[in-house]
Image (cartoon, grey):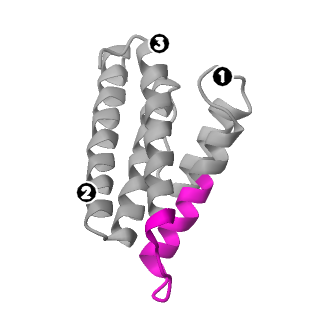
Amino acid sequence: MDAANIKDLAKVRYERACELLEDAKSMLNNDSYKSANNRAYYAAEKAVKAALSLAGKDAETHTGVLRTFNMEFIHTPCAYFDRDDMKNLQSMERIRTSSDYDDFYVANKAECEEQVRKAKNLIAKVEAFLIAEGIDL
């Protein structure tokens, strides 16, 4: 993939992350906490995939996204991301999995608000990274 296409891919993924975040906020406001947890995680994951695309990396699975993000942006010094971002993404993925697959999992408003806050913060960091890399958002 050439540089222009990679930038387009990063932008499309970032825009989708923003849409998913808005979905999460709407679901939170409607007290649909499990669904909001899902959308918040996917918003964060899509934002991370936008950043990974600029590194020429991609992953097909949740574990792969986490691993690749960790290797590309956490273990390798990066001014935009830190270990807390990795911990937050891992935590978000665990809560998303529980929300989606554990029939007896009880999602609550405070936890859901935290999921949305974490997604929003990570998307903001990805936005700063993309802009620094020359992506016109």
Q: Quadrant of residue 103?
A: bottom left
Which label sits on residue 132? Answer: 3
Pinpoint residue 71: horizontal percent, then vertical percent.
68, 37
Magenta-drawn stretch contains 107: yes
Q: Residue at x 71, y 39 (%)?
A: 83
Position of residue 135 measured from the top left corner of the image (x, y, whole percent): 36, 16
- Please, is residue 126 above or below residue 22 in the view? above
Q: Secondary structure at mark 1?
A: loop
- Label 3 residue SS: helix
Q: Earlier in the sequence, mark 2 or mark 3?
A: 2
Depth order, front residue of 136/68: 136
Query: Marks 2 and 1, how far apart in space?
Result: 32 Å
Q: What residue did someone put label 1 on?
A: 78
Residue topped by disc 2? 26
Q: Is residue 14 left or right of residue 41?
A: left
Q: Which residues are magenta?
A: 90-111
**Does residue 58 appear in the picture of this structure?**
yes
Front position in the image: 66 or 57: 66
Q: CA distance from mark 2 to mark 3?
A: 30 Å
Amino acid type of the residue that numbered disc 2 sits on in the rendered structure: Ser
Q: Amino acid at mark 3?
A: Ala
Residue type at numbered disc 1: Cys
Q: Earlier in the sequence, mark 2 or mark 1?
A: 2
